[in-house]
Image: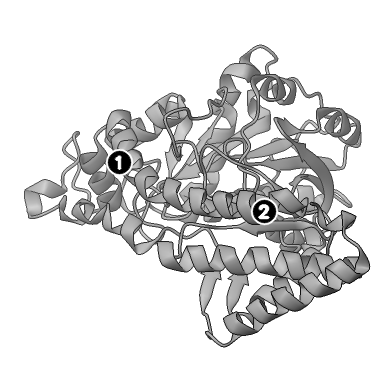
Amino acid sequence: MQYSELTKEELVALYSSLKNEYEDLKGQKLNLDMSRGKPSADQLDLSMDLLKQIIGVYDCKAENGLDCRNYGVLDGLPECKRLFSEMLEVPCENIILGGTSSLALMFDYITQCLLKGSGGLPWSKQSNIKFICNVPGYDRHFSICEYYGIKMISVPLEDDGPDIERITEIIKDPTVKGMFCVPKYSNPTGITYSDEKVRALAALKPAAKDFRVIWDNAYAVHDLNSTPDRLLNIFDACKEFGTEDYFVEFTSTAKISFPGGGVSCIAASENNIKMILSRLNMQTICYDKLNQLRHAKYYQNLEGIKLHMKKHAQIMAPKFNIVLEAFNRELKPYGLAKWTEPNGGYFISLDTLGCSAKRVGELCKSLGVVLTNVGATYPYGVDPDDKNIRIAPSFPTVPELKKAAEVLCLCIKLATIENLV
């Protein structure tokens, strides 16, 4: 029976029983972290052999004979570019390799658009510029906009991608300069944009001719099972409409190899690559080619990456199942929440149905379980409906995750009864 159907007396009695569970858990002094999508130690161990790939002077040469210990090759080693070319289905000449962080590449690109423009007047010389942000979404995207004072416009993320009708209306305003997208296994919902939504985005006709979509394809190969989602190549879709310049794609090996020691990547049209390289020529001489060489030698090709990601899935999938099983057992019969069940990525998105998500976060924190800050999945940290919670199952151990899921479900029950009574 759903909680909303219980009498006040029944709710009070149930609350008293749940409160006893709460006090028992409080006495356990838990310290569990589900706040960020960090790979677990077991996942990091999968790539340790990568660090053995370069031993001795002669192993430090690229396939073209370049000594990777020295300066040069601003856009990245050919053999490592081929890895990303296969992964993103983009020609090597449309790829630039960066350092360890795709977020840093995104930040730098927005900075470039602000200071030098993206084919027109610098954004900073245009007043009151705006960005579309799909919600719920990735808090670090929102942070970039907030840092630079770019006004954010929220657009709902539907089951198969963003609300295209809403976007079509918003981009009639020439001060709207772009949008953030996580098109495959979106953060936090885990949904993948349908072919129809990708084509619709490729067909957009923004009033701003310097409009740019940050296509953050962070989870391109992060499947959890044998029936993964498929994402239509955005640049293939753009060819029909001549809109390739509107999209700049980013990814990295952060959650393939090491978050602190991976390789990042930009994929873009010929025009955008030229503009980005003109800035990078002033910004740096080259990125870490030894690291690029390690990755190229270790993974070799897309098949090597896929085999490696199956090892990640063997660790990750059971963790997702632990959380989903707890939700189906403890929340679904009582109508307390709804959630996504993704085929990949790093997150589950949960919406409470009868209580404040912030109150759930407070109760979890009091029991020693840290969640992503409630509200962080919306611009300015404000969820207008106070319902969304991002669940990150990857980092805790299996026993820790089982306990954390237990605590979360209990806190949703308590917060719902508090709200009803």
Closer-to-camera residue (283/191): 191
Q: Is 116 drawn above or below residue 144 in the view shown?
A: above
* Residue at image location 64% in from the left, 77% down from the top: 21
* Residue at image location 40% in from the left, 41% down from the top: 75
* Residue at image location 77% in from the left, 70% down from the top: 14
The 10 Å Cα crowd at callout 2, few under 14, some 14 to 19, many 20 or more, is many
Q: Amino acid at mark 2?
A: His
Q: Residue 349: percent from the left, percent from the top? A: 66, 50
Q: Is residue 302 visible?
A: yes
Q: Is 4 drawn above or below residue 410 in the view shown?
A: above
Q: Residue 37: percent from the left, percent from the top? A: 52, 58
* Residue at image location 88% in from the left, 52% down from the top: 128
Give the residue pinned by disc 2.
141
Is residue 324 found left or right of 379 in the rendered image?
Answer: left
The answer for how far apart the CA atoms under marks 1 and 2 are is 28 Å
Q: Could you tell me if the residues under marks 1 and 2 are in contact, i.e. CB atoms within 8 Å?
A: no
Q: Is 267 drawn above or below residue 279 in the view shown?
A: above
The secondary structure type at the circle numbered 1 is helix
The secondary structure type at the circle numbered 2 is helix
